[in-house]
Amino acid sequence: ALLAGVNETNNFTKAVSIFPNPVQNELNISLNGTETPLDIQVIDVQGRSVLSTESANSINVQSLEQGLYVLKLNYKDKVSYQRFVKTN
């Protein structure tokens, strides 16, 4: 059962795309036929959650410093991590 969960998470990650990347203002989230994620977090390189929102197709990252971030999407029991670069 554990391996089945891993495969489901991998399939969920493949279904997720974010754009534009690098991004200046608005990061769009496309879920390829899946419903909107329930929980969205932006995590910095130190592992801190710096932005979060719920049930959105985009997140405004304009307030972030430029650099590398990870977008963490929680959908039901699945999690996807997507790296993106914030520019000015």
Image (cartoon, helix red, strand yellow):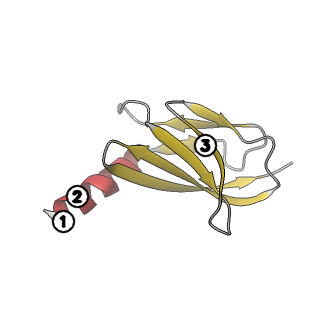
Q: Amino acid at mark 2?
A: Gly
Q: Amino acid at mark 3?
A: Ser
Q: Given this view, does label 1 or label 3 mark the residue nearer the observer?
A: 3
2 or 3: tag closer to the N-terminus: 2
Mark 2: secondary structure? helix
Q: Position of residue 14 (x, y in %)?
A: 38, 50
Mark 1: secondary structure? helix
| Residue occupied by mark 3 | 52
| Residue occupied by mark 1 | 2
What mark, if any, has residue 27 been given in the picture? none
Q: Position of residue 54 (x, y in %)?
A: 52, 34
Q: Residue at x 43, y 53 (%)?
A: 80
* Residue 44 position (above or below residue 76): below
Q: CA distance from mark 1 to mark 3?
A: 28 Å
Q: Residue at x 49, y 30 (%)?
A: 55
| Residue occupied by mark 2 | 5
Q: Position of residue 76 (x, y in %)?
A: 32, 42
On screen, residue 38 versus residue 57, left or right, reads left
